[in-house]
Amino acid sequence: MPDLNGAVTEQDQQRVWAALDKFRIEIPSWGFANTGTRFGKFSQPAAASTIEEKFADAAQVNALTGVSSTMALHVLWDLPSGKSDIPKIQQLERTYGIRSGSINPNLFQDQEYKYGSICNPSAEIRGNALSHLLDSVEIGRALNSRDVSMWVSDGSNYPGTQSIRRRIEYMEEVLAATHAALGPDQRMLVEYKPFEPAFYHTDIADWGMALELARRAGPKAKVLVDTGHHLQGTNIEQIVAWLLHLNALGGFHFNDRKFADDDLTLGSIDPYQVFRIFHEILSDTTTNFNDIAFMIDQSHNLKGKVEAMVQTVATAQELYAKAALVDHAKLAELQKSCSLVEAEETFREAFWTDVRPIVRAWRQSHNLPANPLTALAESGYVEKISQERSAKNAASVSSYA
Ligand code: RM4
Ligand code: MN
Ligand code: MN
């Protein structure tokens, strides 16, 4: 633990390095593509519009950070022809040295999902959603990807218009059938979100619902915590502590928020919260660390996409390194004796310590650039892809109207 002047000992440094050695974070393919708000879309010259471009961008992020060798895929956007796109993805994996990460089925864009997908009152539509989920499981298995990560956008906008309870039963049925199809090394992650796109009721609105659905689906189903999917003031680290306690934490979608599902850069609004979440994980001795999938779920409209992704990975490492500085033995003693100020100061001391020199040294020891953002600027990569892709991106924006 750093002393009161913030000096970091040799031992602290070793602890942080050991923690960084284990830390990996997955990047989302959709973080490189043009996206917009519900009011419009601002096209970026460097945005990726093909799956190959997304792989190329992911490879660049990984070359600079060394900790992001998997990319989450969205089935509809990245494998538009479904299972027949698997060989193409495998080829790209070989070319770019990036492996497929979590597989994200899409249950929200098809016209027939207007009133829901796996909760739709129509058995036929639920059946179509299930067959997409089963395809996603197969895709995941073929790509050696562990997690099928499900976000269910279903819900309703007006009281009395849907049976909340019937929809729970519909969901349970589809999730159980999906779980039954999982291979021995596959898992299902159940994500929750309090509102949007539905505003009256969302079928999986919080971690309690996600947990119970995961439990009923089967032992390979776990809960996915998207840090942006909580109401104001929610104590997210407490949810994380509970999920760890129940052996039900599957992983994270990291981003930050000010109001709702804003998809802002991890730690940009509240870095202390991310530190507190990492602390819960690092102070847990019962969970297998590899069972927690750390993933980014951000899609930037204003920031450059590759720059934002590199910035996010670096921020995650820094906040994680701060959490690794906490002296657990000392903190446990202080908690036991209810030495509140001392306990809090022990916690805060780690948070306020500037760990960037340690993280930089760790990177250099792994032949990585000490500052990946500066290295990205010096590489000229963004200028290069801007030139290559700008005409295509300019053309695509006019078709958005
Ligand atoms: C949702 C949710 C999902 C993500 C989509 C694109 O809000 O966070 O995880 O896949 O957005
Ligand atoms: Mn998410
Ligand atoms: Mn989201």
Image (cartoon, rainbow, N blue to C red):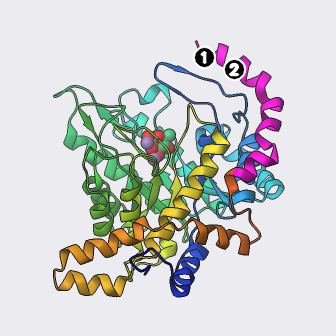
Residue 348 visible at all: yes
User: Horizontally, is 251 left or right of 384 in the view?
Assistant: left
User: Horizontally, is 297 left or right of 371 in the view?
Assistant: left
Q: Is residue 347 above or below residue 294?
A: below
Residue 392 falls within the magenta-colored stretch: yes
Give the percent coordinates (x, y) of residue 24.
59, 66
- The image's mark for residue 225 is none
- Residue type at numbered disc 2: Ser
Give the percent coordinates (x, y) of residue 273.
36, 57
Q: Bin the neighbour count of mark 1 within 10 Å (Cα to Cα): few under 14, some 14-19, many 20 and up.
A: few
According to the image, label 2 marks what residue? 396
Query: Ligand 3 is found in which quarter of the picture?
Result: top left
What distance separates the C-alpha of mark 1 from that of mark 2?
7 Å
Q: Nearer the viewer, residue 191 or 370?
A: 370
- Asked whether the beta carbons under mark 1 and mark 2 sit within 8 Å of each other, the answer is yes
Residue at 73% of width from left, 17% of height from top?
395
